[in-house]
Image (tube, coloured by chain):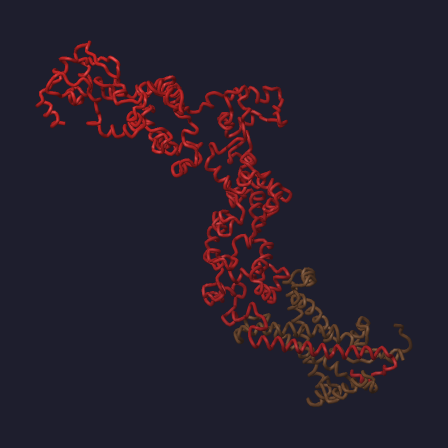
Chain colours: A red, B brown
Amino acid sequence: MLLLGGINNLNAQSNEDCMMCHEDPDLTTIRNGKEVSVFVKANTLLKSVHSKLDCIYCHEDAAVEEFPHAEKLQPVNCGNCHDEAADKFNNGIHGTALRKNAPYAPHCYDCHGSHDIISSSFPESRTYKMNIPILCGNCHKEGAPVSRTYNLTEHNIVENYSQGIHGRGLYESGLFVTATCNDCHGNHLILPSSSSNSTVSTNKVASTCMKCHVRIEQTHKKVIKSELWEKEPGAVPSCTACHPPHKVEYQNIDKTISNKSCLKCHDKNASAGEFIVKQSGDTIRFDLTHLTGSVHYNIQCVKCHTEVSSELHRPCETVEKVDCSNCHIEVSNEYFGSGHGRGFIEKQADAPYCTDCHGTHATKSKVDESSSTYRAAIPQLCGSCHKEDGQANMLGHLKEVDAFSDYSQSTHGKGLTDKGLLVSAVCTDCHTTHHELKESDPLSSVHPTNMAATCAKCHKSIADAYEAGEHSISHSDGTLIYPTCSTCHTAHVISDIQGDKFMNEITNQCGLCHEKLAETYKETYHGKAYLLGYGKAARCSDCHGAHKILKVDNPDSEVGYKNIVKTCQQCHENANLAFTGYLTHATHNDNDILFWAFWGMTSLLIAVFGFFGLHTLFWLWKLKDRKNIIVVSINVSV
Amino acid sequence: MEIEGPQKYYRRFNKRQRVTHIMVILSFLLLALTGMTLKFAHMEWANWIARQLGGVKSAGNIHRFAAIITFAYFTFHLSTLFQLKKKSGLSLKEFLFGSNSLMFSKQDIRDFVSSMKWFFGKGPRPDYGRWTYWEKFDYMAVFWGVAVIGFSGLILWFPEFFTQFFPGWVINVAQIIHSDEALLATGFIFTVHFFNTPPPPPWKSIKKIVHGNIKNWWTLVN
């Protein structure tokens, strides 16, 4: 610049030289067949940002030795200095149009002015923030030549902008920070929204809006999932899909339809106790008192019934089923992943929707005792479908047919109802509140691999013991069936282990897998006494442990050599090591002595019964024939 | 059966022997009932009996109580034998192998052969001695049965004590022997002894058992 300045000084052509001619107000030239003024007001330049520059600095071809300069000068190239802005401009739609000599294509000076160019930080500047909509609107306002000549997708841009939240912010609230055209579209690199590089393209509009609405991800509840918004543009609606560009409004529905207009018809009392009858014949039973007692008491009708149309005489005509995910987005996502939600998506009849559990207008908080989702009421709530003849069984594919009745008998159910324990497990504690899935689903909280962790929410140390034992399903390689909590304790009939019922079942439960051991156990006196209902008879868990069950040959197991004497001593106080040599699950094939003892005794039995059986039959047969009977001579012994 | 004519009674057991026999009967029935209940614990009837007896623990107590009676009459019987020997003034050999003895003798083999012939119609009914050979078997079975079942029963009753001298598997063996020997005894009493020793039908034998006499009913019917 300095160098250039130096050269100019050498030429010694000053602004005064130029002004000698151009200060004449009548000086004109013919351009494109029209007579235009080339008069330059002397003080105009002084106010401009370029006041320190000489004329020839911009009008390069005016720097001539002999005056006057050429009749026709080249247009000023701002890019000589402002090369960055010029590049952007040239790549943008305005620059492209200009190169093609397209009609109404703007030059730099169309926006920035020529000799009167002022910095955008001055309110008088055409590019001052508050003036931008007017500047852009020169061409892009309704009825302007540009909007008539070109097929722009947006109409009434200035009008819409002015009525939108951004425009009102600018004009009504005087907000300097409100968005103007260039904040979204860029200053120089302006591209049509159809271009993928455009700041207002579907892909990029979110990040553009987020220049100001930085935390919109966290605060915006209507967008399906914040991360999708970023990672998969287009997978979810972009900002502009809901908020029409230019006419961005906060919540026009909220503004236009108040509860009062809904209650004109829907307040039961107002319509003398008559219910509203739909065309389909359904009645709408809306009772205002329900809403006043609900957690949504301060939520406007239209916040849930979103599809109202303010243009209609009856705005609710277009109303569809309420979509709770508008606000309860995370919970809704869980729900739609659950068996209930999947059924709902597949349009299965009877698939429960939010309102089936939470109610409609009378929705209450789960901590409210009168709520259907109050903790103590949960079994009743779930049980209304999950009972023997309930709706849940209509499809006929549930493993647990009578969950409600089974649960009610269980230690959990009795804890809740008989002992009044609110901490007692209810349906949702095991099945989750919104992400209920069948046991067979690997994502389910009650899938075998997740079972221990689910029970561990309350029974932590027991789950830890289970995980440490051989039975832990974490050892499973898929070839063997591993037991989980519910294998022994059942899914819903979970009995109190102190009670006889559970302990009477335990050998059957172990026997489900350990068939042979269960059989041989029943041959022992432990097993026999147990079969006859002796509660103190040693059972599987008494010797092998209940949860941390290790293999018999593991020294650390309850029946391993480290612990066996102690284990037997639980009942046989004087037990010693030799005592533990008793073969608890013995069969007569276990060793030679048992083998011969068994077959020796069996042979003896067969021989004696065979011999005397026949002998007695003959004897009785002979006695029938009375002739054979002879007095037995007996010597009397005194 | 109508009883006609004069009735003749033969006393086979003296009073001590009759008391012993009654103890045998009582203890045996209790042992058999409670023991079989345990042995056939998986059967429905065993469960029912256990319940009637006030549970398996109570049944076990009855079993042990009857066992004490058994040990008592066994001791008593041994003393009776000594008394008998002393009274008879016989030497041990004469006492053990004499005609009144319940010890097996060569005569029993001859009686058996004759019985076989009689059964198959090849000869007359043999004239048995004071004791038929199956009556002797009855006695011997009980005598040794009490010893075997009694000892194995003690092992099962006090396993902690016996494993101070024996290895643990002895309990398993004792269980097999105790159980099978008991099955043998019970089966034998109910199927052979009841029909073979007193004249049938068995339910008319109670009086005879109490009195220790056998009515010479063959005489009556002839």
Report the number of numbered marks: 0
The quadrant of the rendering that contains the N terminus of chain A is top left
Give the residue at x 10% y 20%.
Answer: A65
Residue A59 vertical placement versus A356 (above, below):
above
The quadrant of the rendering that contains the C terminus of chain A is bottom right
Q: Examine the image and state in which quarter residue A234 appears.
A: top left
Give the residue at x 51% y 72%.
Answer: A578
Give the residue at x 50% y 64%.
Answer: A567
- Residue B163 visible in the snapshot: yes
Q: Examine the image and state in which quarter residue A314 appears.
A: top right
Q: Out of A471 and A457, give the one closest to the viewer.
A: A471
Residue at the far top: name it.
A26
Could you say where residue A577 lies in the image, as x and y percent from the top left?
49, 70
Residue A187 vertical placement versus A594 (above, below):
above
- Residue A369 visible in the snapshot: no
Residue at the far front: name it.
A33
Could you say where residue B155 lies in the image, as x and y percent from the top left?
59, 73
Residue at the far right: name it.
B5
Q: Out of A481 and A421, give the one closest to the viewer.
A: A481
Could you say where residue A626 lies in the image, as x and y percent from the top left?
87, 79
The answer to whether residue A187 is left or right of residue B41 is: left
The answer to whether residue A548 is left or right of residue A520 is: left
Could you say where residue A351 lies in the image, as x and y percent from the top left?
57, 39
Give the residue at x 70% y 81%.
Answer: B140
Residue A22 vertical placement versus A444 (above, below):
above
